[in-house]
Image: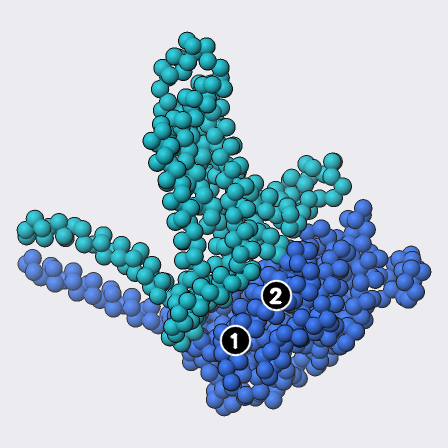
Amino acid sequence: MSDYQLKMAFIMPTMILLILMNIFPLLWSLYLSFHRYKASMPAAPRFIGVRNYARLLQDPEIWGYFQTTAYFVLLAVAAQFFIGFGLALLLNREFRYKGFITTLLLLPMMLSPVVVGLFWRFILFSDNSGLLNFFLSPVLKSPIGWTTHPKVAMLAVVIVDTWMWSPFMMLIALAGLSAVPKYLYEAADVDRASAWFKFRWITLPLVSPLLLIALLFRTMDAFKMFDIVYVLTREGGPGTATETVSMNLYKLAFRNYNTGKACAMAYILLIIIVALSNIYVKYLNRVKGEA
Amino acid sequence: MKSVRISLVLALILAFAFVSATKADNHQSQSLTIVWAEWDPANYLQELSKDFTAETGIAVDVIQIPWPNFQDKVFTAFVGKSDLYDIVIGDSQWLGRNSQGENYINLTDWINENIDVDAIYGPAMTAFAEYPKGSGTYWALPAEVDAAGYVYRKDLFEDPKEMVAFEKKYGYALAPPKTYDQLRDIAEFFTRPDDDLYGIATWYSKEYDGITMGFQQVMWSFGGTYGDAETYKVAGHLNSDDAAKALEFYTDLLQFAPPDAPNYYWAETLNAYNSGKVAMAMNYFAFFPGVLNPEVNKISHDKSGFFIAPAGPKGHYISIGGQGMSISSFSKNKDIAKQYMKWFMQKPVQEKWAALGGFTPHKEVLQSDTFKMASPFNKAFAESFPYLRDFWAVPEYAELLAACQTHWNAAISKIKTPKEALDAIAREHEEIFEDAGYYDE
């Protein structure tokens, strides 16, 4: 066997797997997005041009789901950023039981989103028997409808997602903070720089590239929010208050089996995520250049 | 010598593989898998099926899937052409989709040759077995016939003090309501948040078909409809003034329900009633054994009465429940499945089915005094029959249902006005029908 054949023998299984598992579904779903097709029916896909895309983009409800998703991404990622970074700053010093506390703080991130959703739905957010309403009962006239009031339900989803994913932000920020050279702070101390000055001109510029990467991951992930919404607010309720694009996509694809339309929607979502990621990456490169 | 050893090992492996395959094949041919939602009737069926196993030696396994995931799991199995299930006991609305999707086998000839159709309650046969309606083409046999009904606290309704206070306030005697106006009055009367007591628990949930099954009977009774069954035109029917009034009424009723009522489906309404939180609760009759169980309902298991869903200003309609028994096209045990269904429809088996708690589709058994007296709610259940109506049973029903669930739940959550919600549903329904080619001519 020649060197070339040997190389190919090693590479081909992975290539074939990648093509079958990633590239083919991507192309097949793109093909289906231009067809009327239901996976649950025997009829073959029928070409309808861009009609699926046109229908989706003209549908006022869809824009509502995008708005809900954007609102969620903004609130959740911002909360996770501030809480995660705050926790990282607190943990970036030596104190007793630091390792144990860090491990405890990381626990939510390691749980399954469905378990987290069910845990919050039944233990904490339940209107009748939830712990939160129980503790708030002395100061509240009536229990808070955490998952039943349209204005509160989104807050509930944000709280749960923040509880779960702030540790991720914390972990990345902590990695960045621990990499900042100590001598920079020592030099600043010699110059009698204030704590704010050190944070603004030493910590932040050196940590920001890592923070941006964490923000990028969380934004992409939050944009695809499905599992917690599915479990916690029962498929995006009340009404459409927490119905994200991914939740609606799930219904299109696996409840209605409107496969063609669901593929078109998935591509619209993909384009938006890629565009957002590009903005982040460009900004990240700029920050890196400055740093 | 070495080659002899290798041959021996190979022969042993082959023999083992052959025995295992034969065993597996035998086992498969001698067992039947039925899939149903997770509820009491499925337990009754498992119990009933022991008789079939005793008679035939064929094991029957009734797999139960929680209601919110029931449709998703079964349909996913169909898409994957899985032979996991032999018999599917599915909702009446599934008929169109699974018959046209070739997931159910056509049972018309077999039923005409093997089943006494005249012995089955006619509307049940139409609702659970026939598609298209009136075509005489059958895809199922009715298994469980059900209807939405109400349970109420007799201790509250028959309390002399409450009766006097009610009559003084509303000008008529306190009794199970006959109309939706009366239902509202009673719900209002018993709403006492300071005592953690509310008037009513009914279905508002966005999950599966919760709010749709709860609201549609109110809509019909107020004069609204889903659309024209001939032309499939929806505008002007589903978003009519009558339908809007019905949705206003249903939304208004929410103020007399517990605070978490927007999430209520059958399990939550049952819990609310059993925990003494509400004076009245709506549910499918099949769930009412749970109300009479002293282990689950410590407060009112012996103080509960039952009544049929009230009439509205323009009619009297009740949401049909229950399911039909179909054979999966992907089953490898179709003959055994037919054998089981033939056995199931026999009168003595239906009598036992009813005695266990199942709601029989067998006309004679259903109308017998024995059945009506078998439980405190069977009488109200039998009375509900003339008023039963169903959702669309077309192949696109899941999409139609999803639109209803989303927008009606948005209306009761005050995200949309009733009119906005109905307009949105009407628009989406017409789009769905248009896409499916119903308006092509």
Q: Position of residue B431 (x, y in %)?
A: 54, 71
Q: Position of residue A113 (x, y in %)?
A: 48, 46
Secondary structure under badge 1? helix
Q: Residue at x 76, y 41 (%)?
A: A141
Q: Position of residue B117 (x, y in %)?
A: 57, 87
| Residue of label 2 | B424
Marks 1,2: beta carbons within 8 A:
no
Camera sees residue B332: no
Q: Amino acid at mark 1?
A: Glu
Visual hue assigned to chain A: cyan
Q: Position of residue B432 (x, y in %)?
A: 53, 72
Is B18 or A183 nearer to us in this picture? A183
Whether A164 is drawn above or below A148: the answer is: above
Camera sees residue B222: yes
Whether A253 is drawn above or below B327: the answer is: above
Q: Are marks 1 and 2 on the same chain?
A: yes
Mark 1: few, some, or many residues within 10 Å (few <14, many ≥20)? some
Secondary structure under badge 2? helix
Whether residue B207 sits left or right of residue B338 in the image: it is right
Q: Amino acid at mark 2?
A: Ala
Q: Residue at x 55, y 46 (%)?
A: A71
Visual hue assigned to chain B: blue
| Residue of label 1 | B434
Mark 2: few, some, or many residues within 10 Å (few <14, many ≥20)? many
Q: Residue at x 16, y 50 (%)?
A: A10
Q: CA distance from mark 1 to mark 2?
A: 15 Å
Whether A161 is drawn above or below A39: the answer is: above
Which disc number belongs to residue A161?
A: none
Q: Quadrant of the N terminus of chain B?
A: bottom left
> Which label's residue is closer to the chain start, 1 or 2?
2
Is A282 or B277 nearer to us in this picture? A282
